[in-house]
Amino acid sequence: MVLGLKYRNARQVAAELALPLARSVRDPGLFDVVTWAPTSARRIADRGFDPAELIARAVADLLGLPCRRLLHRGRRSGPQAGKSRGARLVGPEFVGRPLWRNPRVLLVDDVTTTGATLRAGAQALLSAGAAEVRYLAATEAPSSR
């Protein structure tokens, strides 16, 4: 399903992918906002959309929470796909939008391999003023060990 979303423009599966993620959140009241780990500008230009954003917006709708873009990719942050495991462990560079009121954030991504993207996103959000960040991914890709 994730491959269809990412590479075959099957945008309708975002809602299906969001359902188990939303169900895994036992108490939506623990969060103030949902955001996503944005893909690279090049990937958005190629696809015309960000798969993680579509999933995050669907999760937010199911949980009754606002969804906001709180992260941006850094200038030297390209796609993770195709990188070696060592290069993936470094993760992309994210810049968090300055946050007020110390929100509790649910960070969503489409695929995790090493977890570096989610950790980098969480760190950027905490540095920007988030009180707490928890994260979910629609699927986990096999990592090369």
Image: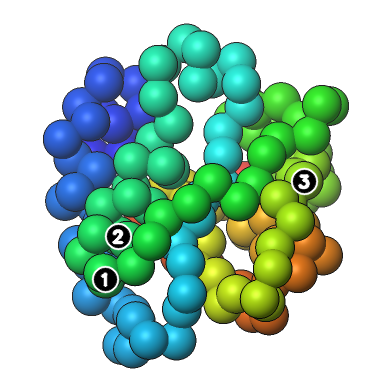
Label 2: few (<14), some or many (≥20) within 10 Å? many
Which residue is located at x 34 percent, y 21 percent? Answer: 7
Q: Is residue 52 left or right of residue 144?
A: left
Which residue is label 3 attached to? 95
In the displayed structure, does residue 63 sit left or right of residue 81? left
Secondary element type, mark 3? strand
The x and y percentages for residue 66 are: 38, 61
Residue at image point 18% right, 40% down:
13
Asked if residue 117 shows in the view, the reply is no
Of the residues shown, which amino acid type is indicated by label 1?
A: Leu
Amino acid of disc 3 = Val
Q: Position of residue 1 (x, y in %)?
A: 23, 40
Residue to which mark 1 is pinned: 63
Report the residue marked by disc 2: 59
**For residue 58, side relative to residue 82 (left or right):** left
Eyeballing the image, is 72 above or below 7?
below
Q: Can residue 125 be seen from the camera position used here?
A: yes
Depth check, front residue: 22 or 61: 61
> In the rendered view, how is the structure colored?
rainbow
Say what amino acid the circle numbered 2 marks: Val
Residue furthest toward the top? 46
Of the numbered discs 3 and 1, the one sitting upstream in the chain is 1
